[in-house]
Amino acid sequence: MTGMESILQGGLQGYLVVALFLFILGLATVLLRRTLLLQFMGVELMLNAANVALLAFARFHGGDAQATVFYLFIIAVAACEAAVGLALVIGLFRHRDTTDSDRAASLKQ
């Protein structure tokens, strides 16, 4: 069996490749995009990549229930983070009329 076939079979490596791809995509979005909303979405992608890796390790090391509970807490925190982050982006847009991170860098006013 080749490396690509083992990834497609759903082994631990396959899940970790997906998690790595999601994390790199999220990191590239945060670093390359100027819009705060897209940067925020990149952070969410990185958080989801960590969740995929956590559940993959939990599944392949005995299906630990504690990891699943931890995953549910991470999802709850991510939902709260999404609400607060979106509120901050909307508030910034109302006061600055932009969501460009470079133009919103000076928040002293």
Image (cartoon, rainbow, N blue to C red):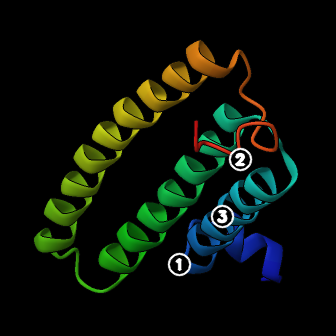
The residue under the point 67% across, 21% down is: 96
* Residue at 19% across, 65% down: 70
Of 48 and 43, which appears nearest the observer?
43
Residue 60 as seen in the image, left or right of residue 88? left
- For marks 2 and 1, give the CA distance: 41 Å
Amino acid at circle 1: Leu
Q: Which residue is mark 3?
A: 23
Name the amino acid, label 3: Phe
In the rendered view, tell whether residue 101 sits above or below residue 49.
above
Residue at numbered disc 2 = 105
> In the rendered image of this protein, does residue 82 appear above or below residue 99?
below
Foreground mark, 2 or 1, reads: 2
Closest to the observer, 107 or 40: 107
Give residue 104's quadrant in the image.
top right
Q: Which residue is mark 1?
A: 12
Of labels 3 and 2, earlier in sequence is 3
Asked whether 101 or 82 is in front, the reply is: 101
Give the secondary structure at mark 1: helix
State left or right for residue 60 relative to residue 2. Answer: left
Task: Describe the element under mark 2 as helix, strand or loop.
Answer: loop
Amino acid type of disc 2?
A: Ala
